[in-house]
Amino acid sequence: GQQLNQSPQSMFIQEGEDVSMNCTSSSIFNTWLWYKQDPGEGPVLLIALYKAGELTSNGRLTAQFGITRKDSFLNISASIPSDVGIYFCAGQGNSGTYKYIFGTGTRLKVLA
Amino acid sequence: EAQVTQNPRYLITVTGKKLTVTCSQNMNHEYMSWYRQDPGLGLRQIYYSMNVEVTDKGDVPEGYKVSRKEKRNFPLILESPSPNQTSLYFCASRSQGLNNYGYTFGSGTRLTVV
């Protein structure tokens, strides 16, 4: 099945640093979502994007819907230890069952 | 509280012994879905349901069955589990159409088949 290319796969950063990750697809999407999964838990929605070019923030998190509609970016500013986890992007097409496609995840580890 | 509840959280079973993982949501969502999560492979969809009595295969349906007799419940059935079905499983639900807020996920079921 189709999957999104998400990068990087994993990253170690120092507390206080900014973090960037992205997802790219060969398909156009109408919706981009960003989820975070804490260890031992299910993914939780962080940010939803519905329009090309849209830039949306949620606290220290900022995500953008790429203008080509084939990519999205998530930035985390001033990282803290509780940011550790796996971040997933998900894209939704505009036809059929409006299925969501998930990225393979970015594992973030924050060093205090 | 709006949530997706799946049980059990942890399960160890033997090859070939039928099992069911239950899933229930209290948000009146039309769509429900099962995913499995394996290292390096992200979330892969097993089966999904668009409403009561309407189900379809996802990307990795082999070895699994589902049913949707009621809107709130969507159990995952493994008729004859095998070791390659050892994985972390998530049930999720969402409303239909575009511009929804994506899936709400359960807390996961970690299955080990020996």
Image: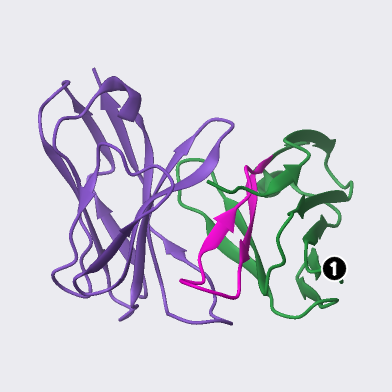
Chain colours: A green, B purple
Q: Nearer the viewer, residue B5 or A52?
A: A52
Above or below residue A59? Residue A39 is above
Q: Is residue B80 above or below residue A77?
A: above
Q: A111 left or right of A47?
A: right
Kind of residue indicated by mark 1: Thr
Which residues, given as a range, are shown in magenta? A86-106
Q: Residues within 10 Å of mark 1 (few under 14, many from 20)?
A: few
At x 52%, y 70%, the residue is B102
Secondary structure at numbered mark 1: loop
Tell me the residue that label 1 is attached to. Answer: A68
Q: Foreground: A43 or A50?
A: A50
**Which residue corresponds to the image point at 74% horizontal and 54% vertical from the top-left?**
A26
Q: Position of residue B60 (x, y in %)?
A: 39, 42
Indicate the position of residue B28 as horizontal and vertical percent values. 30, 81
Q: Nearer the viewer, residue A22 or A81?
A: A22
Left or right: A110 in relation to A36: right
Q: Write the residue at 68% across / 68% down.
A: A29
Q: Position of residue B35 (x, y in %)?
A: 40, 49
Q: Quadrant of the C terminus of chain A?
A: top right
Q: Is residue B31 magenta-colored?
A: no
Q: Is residue B36 left or right of residue A46?
A: left
The chain carrying label 1 is A
Which of the 4 quarters of the picture holds residue B86?
top left
At horizontal 52% and vertical 54% (from top left) the residue drawn is A43
Query: From this viewpoint, which residue is outermost toward the left?
Result: B17
State left or right for residue A60 relative to residue A104. right
